[in-house]
Image (cartoon, rainbow, N blue to C red):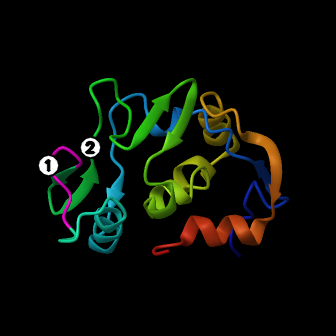
Amino acid sequence: MAKEKWYKEGLKFTCTQCGNCCGGPPGFVWVTKKEIVAIAEHLGEEDGVLSKVQLRRVGFRHSLTEKPNGDCIFLKRENGQVFCGIYEVRPLQCRTWPFWSDNLASRSAWDSASQTCPGMDEGKYHNFVSIEELRRKRTW
């Protein structure tokens, strides 16, 4: 019998556009070839290629780059506003926050992530099925 998930009753989350999940300590925003092409086209790069300022190779994979302060290269902070410069074509990893397997591993993991994300445990209710769909999603 499968172990019952601690979030079986669902969770609340609404993005507050604080930008905390898009900056901070160094990390990786993994992108697929399809996502790279979509981002490049969104930015007007007809060849479907991102520059080395925007994209880095890590082993056999690719990740978006970061600014010196740890912000994602596409995170914009202007006039007191925080927003994603590629929101319409943001990678799957960004689209599925905070419903990542690491965050859902335990209530304490979720609580730890919520320390820097004011949208967690607030706002829109997500039922178990929708959480699992997001957690398991591999393409968008």
Q: Is residue 91 left or right of residue 112?
A: left
Camera-side residue of 21 and 49: 49
Q: Position of residue 52 (x, y in %)?
A: 14, 48
Task: For the residues labelled 2 and 1, say whether their Cβ atoms are less than 8 Å apart.
Answer: yes
Q: Judging from the image, what secondary structure is the residue with disc 1 in?
A: loop
- In the rendered view, would you say 79 is above or below 28? above
- In the rendered view, would you say 99 is above or below 48? above
Q: Amino acid at mark 2?
A: Thr
Q: Amino acid at mark 1?
A: Lys
Q: Where is residue 8, by image quadrant?
A: bottom right
Q: Which residue is mark 1?
A: 52
| Quadrant the N terminus occupies | bottom right
**What number is the disc on residue 75?**
none
Camera-side residue of 122 and 47: 47
Question: Disc 2 or 1, which lies upstream in sequence?
Answer: 1
Specify the principal SS of the magenta part.
loop
Camera-side residue of 134 and 74: 74
Q: Position of residue 138 (x, y in %)?
A: 46, 73
Q: Judging from the image, what secondary structure is the residue with disc 2 in?
A: loop
For the record, the magenta segment spans 49-54
Q: Position of residue 45 (x, y in %)?
A: 23, 64
Q: Which residue occupies 43% across, 61% down?
A: 91
Q: Where is residue 41, by image quadrant?
A: bottom left
